Amino acid sequence: MREQQLQSILRHMPAGIATLLGPELRYGFVNEAMQALLGGDTPEGQPLANHLGVLAADLLEVMQQVYKSGRPYVAKAYALPLLDAAGARPRLATLT
C-alpha cells in the first residue's frame, strides 16, 4: 500500500518527475506534469533521446556519464529544448 500511495503522490505533483532506466536512458516512471511537458505523450519505455531537440545532445551526454559513473551532475538551471510526440513543435523547458 505504501508504494501505491507514493506513486499516487508523485504522479500528481505539479513538478515534472521521471525516472530513466538502463544505458539507453529509457523512461520508467513519468508523472502527469512531465507528460504535459513532453507534449501529452506517455513516453514509458521510450529513450530520452526521442524527446530531446538537437540542441540537447550535450544533456544526453551528461546523463549517460551520470549513469556510467554513478556520480550526480549538479547545475543551477538548464534550458532544455523538447519535442512533442510527433517530433515537431520544439518547446523550451528550464530544469533546475
Image: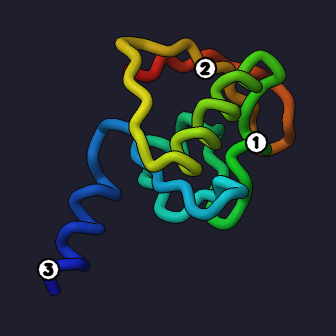
* Alpha carbon separation for disc pair 3 and 1: 32 Å
Label 2: how many Cα within 10 Å (few below 14, some 14–19, many 20+)? some
Residue nearer the viewer, 51 or 8: 51
Q: Which residue in the structure is indicated by mark 2?
A: 80
Along the horizontal axis of the image, is 34 left or right of 13? Answer: right
Question: What residue do we see at 30% from left, 53% from top?
Answer: 12
* Residue located 24% across and 78% down the image: 4
Which dot marks residue 2?
Answer: 3
Q: Is residue 42 above or below residue 62?
A: below
Q: Which quadrant of the rendered structure holds the N terminus?
A: bottom left
* Residue 60, picture quadrant: top right
The residue that mark 1 highlights is 49
Q: Amino acid at mark 2?
A: Leu
Q: Nearer the viewer, mark 3 or mark 1?
A: 1
Say which label, 3 or 2, has the lower sequence index: 3
- Horizontal and vertical percent position of residue 9: 22, 59
Q: Is residue 39 above or below residue 82?
A: below
**Picture coordinates of residue 30 (x, y %)?**
48, 56
CA–CA distance in space, label 2 to label 1: 12 Å
Assign a secondary structure to mark 1. helix
The residues tagged by marks 3 and 2 sit, at their Cα atoms, a distance apart of 33 Å
Residue type at tag 1: Ala
| Residue drawn where x is 54% and y is 55% of the image | 20
The residue lying toward the viewer, choosing from 24 and 54, is 24
